[in-house]
Image (cartoon, grey):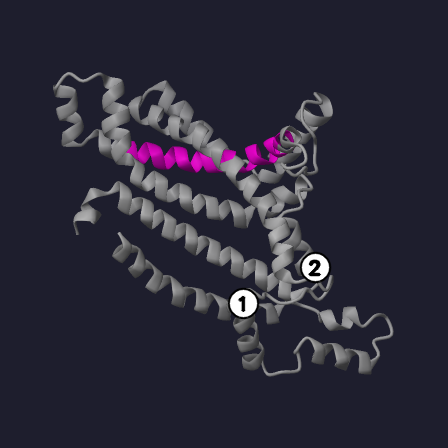
Amino acid sequence: MLAFIGRRLLVAIPTILLISVFVFLLQQLLPGDPILAMAGEERDPATIEFLREKYGLNDPLPVQYFKWIGGVIQGDLGISLRTNQPVSELLLQKLPVTIQLAVMALIFAVVIGVPAGILSAVKKGTVVDYAANVVALSGLSIPNFWLGIMLILLVSVKWGLLPASGYTPPGEDLVRSITTMLMPAFVLGTALAATLMRHTRSAMLGVLKSDYVRTARAKGLYERRVILRHAFRNALVPIVTLTALLFGELVAGAVLTEQIFTIPGFGKLVVDAVFNRDYAVVQGIVLCTAVGFIVMNLLADAAYFALNPRLRKS
């Protein structure tokens, strides 16, 4: 297994370096100049020149890149041009919030999507199968922002069951933290549940036609044991792989949901950074997101290796 993961790391390292180059170059395309905004209304040339020199913006792009990537390797993502805080500190403040939201959303997705996919495959061609597919297509089609607004209007404003917005750290009040995150997690989880349902159904349909499933049934095993122990266990490989990738997507793609529910996570941070032309923060967020996807890919590969005996024999 170590050799298998080692081969994946050999591919991941140059990928991260290539991504870092793109991240650095693409931020140059952001409109506006943050130094002009920092210089104030008078925009004194001496002040502008001092700020450019202070943040190294007068250096050629290759020099700027190597300074930046050298700091990144040491854990220094730079300084925010707006708040003058280290970018790494800002990310460490916001990342746990988004991870909590992503974990809760993934729980919703797995609890809803996987059983629905299994049931749809087992009951193929029946009313249950058609109903599950309709619900899955609805989950994929309904925009997150619309579902979020509707939940706020009904659940919070009309019925008063859950908080409409905001965030409470789990360390302060665990119950309120969970209740505050329930609606945004459900909004994110429904679309992913639909995706998981479709992939689970597809994987189960392929496995249910296998010889070993027919053999298990011929032996007289209970249908429930055949489905869960023999069929579902062998259909887990693509499901686990997809789940790992969906978690990375949740961390990176919760921007709109966090804005709707006023959650101070990665989404709000990246929106504020883009509007304020805070290049260092944008670079740090995009790079961390890309590295997160690569890490989740590595975990998915490790899970694939653990679940697939044929890889362990190769």
Label 1 sits on what residue type?
Answer: Val
How far across and how far down the image is residue 195, in percent? Answer: 42, 38
Q: Main SS type for the magenta part?
A: helix
Pick whichever of labels 1 and 2 is earlier in the sequence: 1
Magenta highlight on residue 180: yes
Q: How crowded is mark 1: few (under 14 residues within 10 Å), some or many (20 or more)?
A: some
Magenta highlight on residue 122: no
How far across and how far down the image is residue 168, in percent? Answer: 68, 37
Residue stretch rendered in magenta on the structure: 178-204
Instruction: Classify mark 1: helix, strand or loop.
Output: helix
Question: In the rendering, which numbered label is found on residue 275?
Answer: 2
Does any portion of residue 162 appear in the rendered image?
Answer: yes
Q: Name the residue under label 1.
A: 72
Instruction: Classify mark 2: helix, strand or loop.
Output: helix
| Left or right side of 138 for 240 | left
How far across and how far down the image is residue 103, in percent? Answer: 51, 39
| Left or right side of 116 for 285 | right
* Above or below, comparing residue 310 to residue 224 in the picture: below
